[in-house]
Image: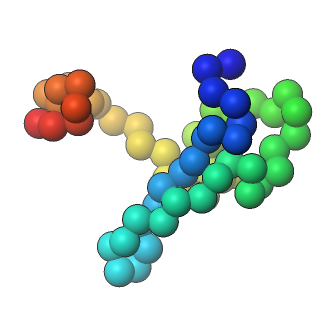
Amino acid sequence: ELFRRDQVWFVEKDNAGASVLYPLLEFSPRKGEALAKGYLRGRYGAIPFIGSLEGFDSNGKA
């Protein structure tokens, strides 16, 4: 795997527009769990970004 589980964090915006960070380990994923599949299904709370990044440079700027 590319990252250890303790290196994975999620970001969500709260109602005031502030970013809130929380770790994957907060969800106690099982060993061998398909993390990408769980993320795409919304299991970890963060809303998956599925869209085109075309037009953005490597720094995330348009």
Vertical placement of residue 44 versus 38, above or below: below
Q: Residue furthest right?
A: 31
Give coordinates of residue 54: x percent, y percent.
20, 26
Vertical placement of residue 43 versus 59, above or below: below
Asked whether, in this view, residue 14 is left or right of residue 9, the answer is: left
Vertical placement of residue 51 versus 1, above or below: below
Give coordinates of residue 31: x percent, y percent.
88, 33
Q: Which quadrant would residue 49 be assigned to in this image? A: top left
Residue 37 is at least partly visible in this image: no
Residue drawn at x 81%, y 44% is: 29
Of 27 and 47, the residue lying toward us: 27
How many marks on residues? Answer: 0
Which color mode does the image show? rainbow
Residue 43 is at least partly visible in this image: yes
Residue drawn at x 60%, y 58% is: 22
Asked whether, in this view, residue 29 is left or right of residue 46, the answer is: right
Quadrant, the N terminus: top right
Quadrant, the C terminus: top left
Give coordinates of residue 2: x percent, y percent.
61, 20
Residue drawn at x 74%, y 57% is: 26
Give coordinates of residue 59: x percent, y percent.
22, 32
Residue drawn at x 76%, y 54% is: 27
Q: Which quadrant would residue 55 be assigned to in this image? A: top left
